[in-house]
Amino acid sequence: MRPHPRLTALFARLEIATLFALVVLAGALWAFVALASEIAEGDLHAFDEAILMALRTAGDPSDPIGGHGVEIAMRDLTALGGVTVITLIASVVVIYLALQRHAASAVFLAGAIIGGSLLSTVAKLAFDRPRPELVPHGVEVVTASFPSGHSMMAAVTYLTLAVMLSRNEHQFRLKVFHFAVAVLMTFLVGASRVYLGVHWPSDVLAGWALGAAWALGVAMVAQTLGRRGRIDPAQGDDA
């Protein structure tokens, strides 16, 4: 008995999507490793220093460009990648999924974000890079610099939330909306860390790369678990 043409096309799309996801995942991991290697050799110091100084008023490293209002806005944005806000937002979405009777998805989401947080902590302890001292810090910091924990956790949390929320959407445009918001939030958090002088730009790039790799891995696992019935399957023809 020959398989139905639509079924054959679906499996072909799944194979292409999986291959593409693996390539992107490998690329993100390669980017992180490459950044770590360059930092260990000191090759990115000039790049990092140039970006940090470009965000400061000429001749006064203590004065960020844009004025006091922009600095306040950046402090607000950087909080979106902090433990308190991340925990609050993730908890709200986990509760929402539970109330929607997607208990397995809620547990999976919580585990994915906690796992990403542990990975960020381990990475910081492993590299133990000092914070920038080139410019004054705009907010208080207590941990190591590489990779940027705020940037990584923003990528882990917001991209993972987009993955899980989009699985329950039937409309493709709403799926795109979830990911567009997640990418924007991740970018703003990372940019704010450099602007406030608490991270080298390479710290943020590494945080984005590792966080995106984690979120993409979560998406692939979720897709597999959904097909096996372990969590709720993705909705819509374009799932």
Image (cartoon, grey):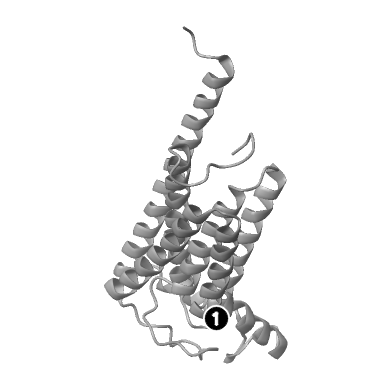
Give the x, y percent position of residue 86: 53, 73
* Residue 23 showing in the rendered view: no
Quarter of the figure with residue 113: bottom left
| Front position in the image: 101 or 114 | 101
Extreme residue toward the left, this view = 126
Looking at the rendered image, the quarter that the C terminus falls into is top right
Q: Which residue is mark 1?
A: 53
Query: On screen, 195 above or below 163?
Result: below
- The image shows residue 153 at horizontal and vertical percentages of 47, 68
Question: Residue drawn 53% across and 29% down?
Answer: 13
Q: Residue at x 34, y 77 (%)?
A: 129
118, above or below 17, in the image = below
Rendering coords of residue 170 (x, y %): 67, 42
Q: Position of residue 9 (x, y in %)?
A: 55, 22
Q: Amino acid at mark 1?
A: Met
Q: Horizontal placement of 152 versus 123: left or right? A: right
15 on left or right of 167: left
Q: Is residue 184 above or below residue 46?
A: above
On the rendered structure, is 119 left or right of 113? left
Residue sitting at 64 percent across and 34 percent down?
A: 237
Front residue of this view, candidates 96 and 75: 96
Q: Residues within 10 Å of mark 1 (few under 14, many from 20)?
A: many
Q: Looking at the image, is 100 positioned above or below residue 192?
A: above
Tell which of 176 and 184 is nearer to you: 176
Question: Which residue in the rendered view is the most extreme toward the top?
Answer: 1
Residue found at x 38% / y 63%: 115
> Is residue 135 in view?
yes
Q: Quick one: SS at disc 1?
A: helix
Mark count: 1
